[in-house]
Image (tube, coloured by chain):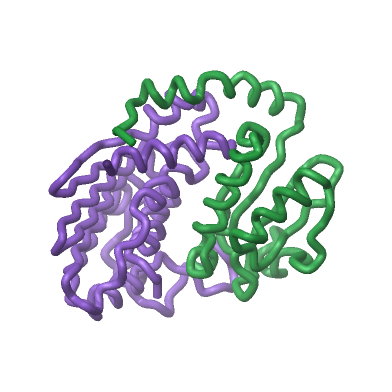
């Protein structure tokens, strides 16, 4: 692969952009929030984030899902943690999300609206929740 | 401890963004023998006293996570440098900004692996918030400079001011990896 120019980037992006704007205004966007604090990264959160990016793009959903980084949710023993926020589903924090679980989250939670019961954590640690 | 140098670099760079910097300059120079990093920001900076406290692994200002011991990760930098003969330096001026530099000997067996450099760049470019970031990368076989504002513009995200959807993250990753050719 040769070095890409900013113009190459612009062209590759071109077509998907208007679609994304439309979905955002319709409130159809799914949010995947990956814990990228020191604890998350130590547990492999970068690989988790990569897996989400790869899976979503392979399934043609790159424009439908927003991926954000967040800090520690106080659940360091269960890192990498990932919160999924989407319409018609409760906000869920999943723990121990490696690349394999990330794929399952895309296929089950996001695409089929099914929960991955084994991976669910209740909520952030008490002292992390905003008062 | 961080498993790779790039993981530690991510934490150190995040400090600049969290210090309210509007411009962050990151330089990563790497050869077979050595890697050096410099992070320069125009964030809120620290007084000599604050800087001294930030070097203490048991100190926290208690602002980010009240009741928890969370710091800037500077003790990790010091510890890592000390264990493998690396060098580090921090210059900071209250209200002006901070410059963090470090250098590691890649031939020293105790130096952690460098890790994923483009993954590091992608992570620091995609923190929430509006800030300009200029990344300069130099190796004996290639060198390049990227600017956050130009990447946002190319991806049609100049209005939002931050990278959002999975599609833009994939393209950003692809772009950064192509620069390492």
- Any part of residue B87 in sight: no
Q: Position of residue A89 (x, y in %)?
A: 84, 47
In the displayed structure, A26 sits above or below A37; it is above
Question: Which quadrant of the figure has residue B81?
Answer: bottom left
Question: Which quadrant of the figure has residue B135?
Answer: top left
Question: Which quadrant of the figure has residue B11?
Answer: bottom left
What colour do you see for chain B? Answer: purple
For the view shown, which residue lies furthest in the right direction? A88
Residue at 74% over, 47% down: A85
Name the one closer to the observer, A57 or B99: A57
Residue at 51% over, 27% down: B157
Q: Is residue B154 shown left or right of residue A24?
A: left
Name the one closer to the observer, A58 or A91: A58
What colour do you see for chain A? Answer: green
Q: Position of residue B38 (x, y in %)?
A: 23, 53
Q: Position of residue B92 (x, y in %)?
A: 26, 56
Name the one closer to the observer, B161 or A78: A78
């Amino acid at each position: 692969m040769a070095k890409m120019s900013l113009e190459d980037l612009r062209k590759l992006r071109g077509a998907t952009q208007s679609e994304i704007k439309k979905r955002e205004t319709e409130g159809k966007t799914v949010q995947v929030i990956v814990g990228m604090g020191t604890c998350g990264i130590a547990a492999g959160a970068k690989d988790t984030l990569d897996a989400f990016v790869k899976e979503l793009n392979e399934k043609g959903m790159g424009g439908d899902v927003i991926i954000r980084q967040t800090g520690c949710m106080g659940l360091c023993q269960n890192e990498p943690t990932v919160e999924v926020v989407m319409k018609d589903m409760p906000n869920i924090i999943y723990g121990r999300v490696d690349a394999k679980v990330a794929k399952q989250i895309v296929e089950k939670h996001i695409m089929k609206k099914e929960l991955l019961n084994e991976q669910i954590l209740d909520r952030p640690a008490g002292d992390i929740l905003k008062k | 401890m961080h498993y790779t140098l790039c993981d530690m670099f991510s934490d150190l760079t995040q400090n600049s963004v969290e210090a309210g910097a509007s411009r962050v300059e990151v330089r990563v120079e790497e050869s077979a023998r050595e890697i050096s990093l410099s992070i320069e920001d125009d964030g809120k900076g620290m007084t000599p006293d604050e800087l001294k406290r930030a070097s203490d692994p048991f100190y926290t200002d208690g602002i980010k996570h009240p009741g928890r011991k969370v710091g800037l990760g500077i003790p990790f930098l010091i510890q890592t440098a000390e264990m493998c003969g690396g060098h580090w330096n921090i210059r900071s001026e209250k209200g002006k900004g901070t410059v963090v530099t470090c250098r590691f000997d890649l031939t020293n067996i105790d130096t952690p692996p460098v890790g994923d450099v483009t993954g590091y760049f992608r992570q620091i470019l995609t923190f929430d918030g509006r800030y300009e970031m200029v990344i300069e990368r130099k190796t004996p076989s290639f060198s390049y400079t990227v600017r956050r504002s130009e990447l946002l513009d190319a991806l049609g995200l100049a209005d939002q001011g931050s990278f959002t959807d999975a599609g833009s993250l994939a393209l950003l990753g692809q772009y950064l990896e192509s620069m390492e050719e």
